[in-house]
Amino acid sequence: MANTLAKTRKAIMRTFFLNSFNRDVVILIIISVAIGSLLAGIVAMAANSYFSETISTLVGEYGEFDLLINVREEMKEAGRTQIEKVIGQVFPGATLKEGPTLTGLTSFFVGLPAEYKTKQAYETMDSIFGSVPGRSGISIMTEPRITVRAVPEGARQLVIEQIMQIDGVLFAFRDGGSVTVIIKSLEQSSYVNAEIEKLFAQYHIIDIAFPVGSEPENAIRLGEQLADAVRAEKAAGYAESVSVDSKNNEMVYLTSTMIELKRFLTAFITKAALTPAAGVRVTAGDVIVFQGTAANAPSPGTAPEPDNVLVQVTAVKDDGSADGMVIQGNPMEMSNTQGYAVINNTIGELVGTASFHNPRAALGNALHETAGVVEQIPGIAQDAQNMTSIANKTLDNYGTSLTAIEQTLASLGNAGTTIEAATSGLANLNTGGIQSQVTNSSRAIGSVLNTLQVARLLNADVASSINELTVTQQNLANLQAGLSALENVSATARQAQSAIDGIVTNGNNTVTSLRSFDVSGTRQTLNDINGRLAQLQAFDTPLVAAQLQYLGAAVPNLKDEEISQSIKLLDQFIAGQVIPSQRLQLLTKSSITPDFVAPVIYNVVGHSNLSLYTSALGVIEPDPRAEVMMILSQVKAILAGMISLIAVILFLALDHTAIMSVIRRQRTVGKTLKTKGWRRLAQSIQNTFTAPECLYGMGIGALLLTAMFVLSGGGIPYLPWVGVPFLGAALGWLIANNAEKISPLATDEVIAGEALGLSFDEVMREIVIPNSRPGLLQTLNRRKMKFR
């Protein structure tokens, strides 16, 4: 341990404090690093200054200008004059500089005073400089700034409001289709950028894509309905339709109105229900011609006539039938319903038949009929009130009537009792026996009369007796008839009594039921009805009837071809002008996935024939000027790194190869490889990496390159800092293995010097270094030489 410490102390003293060659090597390394770093730094700084000056000459110093106005080259003089006039009136104190002319456009740079750098001013720059002749565009150059692109139109205001709350933001504003953020200072740029990234991480956009043919009729309204449905889900919490800025964009209002107008016109155009012929299929968009009011039916091979009816297919059903709309002619007056295909304005083969429905005429008739009904409402209400009055009077007599019925039933009951008492005596009378006796007596009298009749022939005095007997017989006959009637009366009285009992029983039950009827409730209901009828009578039915008649007269008096042309014109304006009808965008929290909202969206849309995917709320676009400056800084680092590499290679090759050759001689003098075969080859390969001269070269190379990179700010693309020492070591290793070829050693002179008793330091300073490659070490060694 003591020997090791002693050797270490001796090496340190020899290297840093004694006048030894080791100290010469240390001084050489320090001077080499200084020269290499200085040279690399000067070249890199010169290149960076040149390019920076070039950019500053073109676009001004960093933060010097705020606006870039491009004007067509042929109009640049008039444009410059107008720009000067505008900034003199609106931005007093602003500076103007004419830039280069590229691709036929001349650039003008405008620097604004600090008091005019406001959100309102930046948002109205287009209108402020709108009078500049030949203007091709205006760009914001204020620095430092951050530009956020790909923000949906409906989410830009939310993004601006959120960004304005970030510390360090001066203001944010709409810049065309982007959001531009002006930052207070360059030092706060990184913080603001990080905060915006955090903001965007909280949200994402759910895009809803509809295939061709399944686009919604009113995408704006559907987007709002989808947002409301998603918000209704407790787990979602937040959702907004951001396809368009439905709150601030006047064009959106106009488009929504046009969409509704198109829907209104489509609802009132004459509809056709098509039934294709056997083997014929139609597709949406096909045009079919009908005879209409033309004199002749359509003839294949000819062009349709102006009086023909043309129908465009709008939808095809699963069973092959189709719906269409009339785009020419009046189908309501034609009797021939056969239709023919129209291809390239030429009538083709028979397609099928059709039935037509005109919603405009149906609506007009319905309104006129409704107006007639409304006019009858006052009379109907009056009649109903009269009926309620009669019903109230009936209810007033209801109790009296029930009492009279009860009294009648009681009288019937008494009559039944009387009949029962009267018939009870007859029930004990044997009228049958009396009738039998009367009959026998009548027969006996008859026999006597017969006898007396015979006797009368003999004695006329018996005539009076015959008459008396005849009268008696007649009385008996009357008595028999009376007894028979009396028996019938008794039977009828019993039947009457039974009927009266039934009537009384049923009448009592009926009276009981009638007594349970809610007279008061019915009277209250009638009074309520009477009150409503009074309100109905107070209603201004003549005004309503007049308005209905007005609406009936105001039904669109348009021809079907006029409606169809209007729909086409609206489609041309709506389609793709303001909103993409094939895509809707919902802004939600980033935790909400498409799979979560898919059932809700399918339910609102009514089908699942759509695609869902997510996208970022916005993309942060770096400042172009900052990007250029970053590129220049990278170029500066690359130049410094390349100069450092070249310097290390030169220093190693010119100064250190002689030292490495001496180290190699010391390692190989008097030593031979005793091994043979593959062991000899392995030993050679090992020496290639572990030989002292190789270790020296790798150490010096790593030290020189790392130090120069650090001091000069060098860098190599895709090479991390940890790789710089390894690159330097690789250069040192490569040169160490070729040291004798680069700087051959004068072996005879070295042997002679050693024979003369020269020390290692003297051999290196007097023999090796003077005979080596000319370089920095040789220059520094001249002051150490004794033999010149």
Image (tube, rainbow, N blue to C red):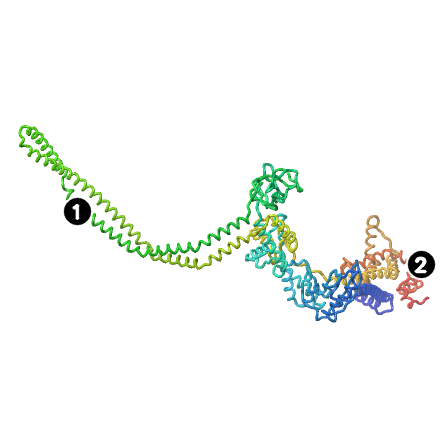
Spot occupied by residue 108 in the image (x, y as percentages of width and height): 77, 64
Q: Which is more toward the observer, 319 or 768?
A: 319
First in residue order: circle 1 vs circle 2: 1
Spot occupied by residue 566 in the image (x, y as percentages of width and height): 62, 51
Q: Secondary structure at mark 2?
A: helix
Locate residue 342: give its quadrant: top right
Spot occupied by residue 593 in the image (x, y as percentages of width and height): 60, 54
Locate residue 189: give its quadrant: bottom right
Locate residue 515: give its quadrant: bottom left
Spot occupied by residue 520 in the image (x, y as percentages of width and height): 34, 58
Bin the neighbour count of mark 2 within 10 Å (Cα to Cα): few under 14, some 14-19, many 20 and up.
few
Bin the neighbour count of mark 1 within 10 Å (Cα to Cα): few under 14, some 14-19, many 20 and up.
few
> Left of 358 or right of it: where is 655?
right
Q: Which is more toward the observer, 432 or 49?
A: 432
Q: Which is more toward the observer, 755 or 275?
A: 275
Q: Quadrant of the C terminus?
A: bottom right
Q: Secondary structure at mark 1?
A: helix
Label 2 is placed on what type of residue? Asp
Label 1 is placed on what type of residue? Ala
| Tag 1–tag 2 contact (CB < 8 Å) | no
The residue wearing badge 2 is 748
- Judge whether 177 appears above or below 321 on screen: below
- Judge whether 569 appears above or below 428 on screen: below
Residue that protrudes farthest toward the right in the picture: 788
The residue wearing badge 1 is 421
Residue that protrudes farthest toward the front in the picture: 460
1 vs 2, front mark: 1
Q: Quadrant of the N terminus?
A: bottom right
Query: Which numbered disc covers residue 148?
Result: none
Q: Which is more toward the observer, 443 or 413?
A: 443
Q: Is residue 724 visible?
A: no
Q: CA distance from mark 1 to mark 2?
A: 181 Å
